[in-house]
Amino acid sequence: MISPRLAACAAISLAITATAVNAQQDGAEGAASCLPQGMFAQPDYVSVEQLEDGRITFRLCAPEAREVKVTSNDVDYAIPMGLAPGSERGLAMTMDDTGLWSVTTTVPVDPDTYRFNFQVDGARVPDPMATTFSRERTGINSTFEVTGPEGAFQSWHADVPHGLVSRLEYWSDPIGAKREAFVYTPPGYMNGSETYPVLYLVHGAGDSADSWTSVGQANDILDNLLAAGEAREMIIVMPFGHTPPRADANMLANTDFGEDLHQALIPYIDSNFRTIADADHRAMAGLSMGGAHTIRFGLPRPDVFSHIGIFSMGLGMGPDDVSNYKAQNGDALAEAAEEMDLVYYAMGTEDFLYGTVAPTRAMLDEAGIEHIYNESGGGHTWINWRRYLQDFLPRLFRAD
């Protein structure tokens, strides 16, 4: 008599064998399938390959698919998908006799970190062979890095001491919700007793709490700066910039986020991490929506922050944007002019928000707030934001 366990194993084996046979039959006649053949078999292809000339080959095993493309949110500024303005989005792939789809970019891809997905018969699908992913506000992307000297500042290097990135959850009384944040602690933090300054670093509207590490490479950027002696050791707190939706909520002027930041997150961090809990040792920065949060909940709070970084965001998108901001924050801006150690502002000339630079800088000048302005090429993209962070971090907490 066969034991129930042996019978179950036999059934699983038969099912896997049948699946493999069917997959092979579903492929082109006489060709083996790209699908794994056997219980513990692994797919036998590389999904993202960097060629010697810098081009990138993408692959996906999907024998039953009718149309497959490579797509990316970075398409306008980063991965050369072979697109011209007005053309159909995505890089079309072709299938071989085994059901393996592939395509190679027409030009080399610059060294950097990129998000991408496959579009399979109209559906967005993360790379099933990927080992790195980056969340958006909703959904997920696969990621890959093109290595090279120009991108070395953001790469992981074996000969560099590395900090630790932790994910934490905390309860926010002001908004009545469980929240999350990612926290970078520098090399040596886990076994030491030293206290550290803190940077609160916020993502953009389409992103999530993990974005500054999963695609922004903030941890690797700071690790490399620390190893080179170019920045001060610090903790980086990366909060979730979105809050539970409300009918009258304003994404860029989200007071729920401001209340959560000041009344819940900062006290939680100061209570659970070895921080130097004063304004002189606390900074805030953000990109896009996170830049708006920084303008509204960081710049007018010199009692909390002494260093401010605004990436790819400004005032002036609405006709009364600047005047309303000044009316709400006039006294606080006067204090900021006296007390802020650093106000840093960065924007790309091709950014769709570039028009907000002039009114924002005029507001800063009118308030007497000295600031460093970093104008780059490029647009509203992680390629710029990683470089802004690299330029910003060495400027923090230098007074000590």
Image (spheres, rainbow, N blue to C red):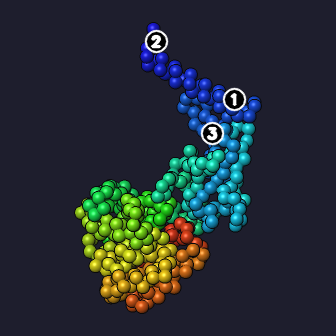
- Characterize the local packing of mark 3: few (<14), some (14-19) or many (20 or more) Cα atoms within 10 angstroms: few
Q: Is residue 382 left or right of residue 398?
A: right
Q: Is residue 106 above or below residue 331?
A: above
Q: Position of residue 136 (x, y in %)?
A: 49, 57
Instruction: Give x and y (percent) for residue 211.
Output: 46, 60
Q: Residue at x 71, y 62 (%)?
A: 87
Which quarter of the image is occupied by the N terminus?
top left
Residue annotated with mark 3: 44
- Circle 1 is placed at which residue position? 25
Asked where in the image residue 323 lies, by quadrant, the reply is bottom left
292 or 247: nearer the viewer: 247
For label 1, count other residues whose C-alpha is less than 10 Å away and answer few (under 14), some (14-19) or many (20+): some
Residue 201 picture location, percent across and down: 40, 68
Q: Which mark, residue 66? A: none
Q: Residue furthest left?
A: 271
Q: How far apart are the two marked residues, 3 and 1, measured between alpha carbons?
A: 18 Å
Whether residue 164 is visible, yes or no, is no
Q: Is residue 284 above or below residue 245?
A: below
Mark 3: which amino acid?
Asp
Q: Earlier in the sequence, mark 3 or mark 1?
A: 1
Residue 355 in view here? yes
Instruction: Write the residue at 27% across / 71% down.
Output: 276
Q: Where on the picture, by quarter, is residue 21?
A: top right
Question: What residue type is disc 2 on?
Answer: Ile
> What residue is pinned by disc 2?
2
For marks 2 and 1 on the same chain, the one whose residue lies earlier in the sequence: 2
Q: Kindly identify the amino acid type of the residue bearing the numbered disc 1.
A: Gln
Residue at screen point 60% across, 38% down: 43
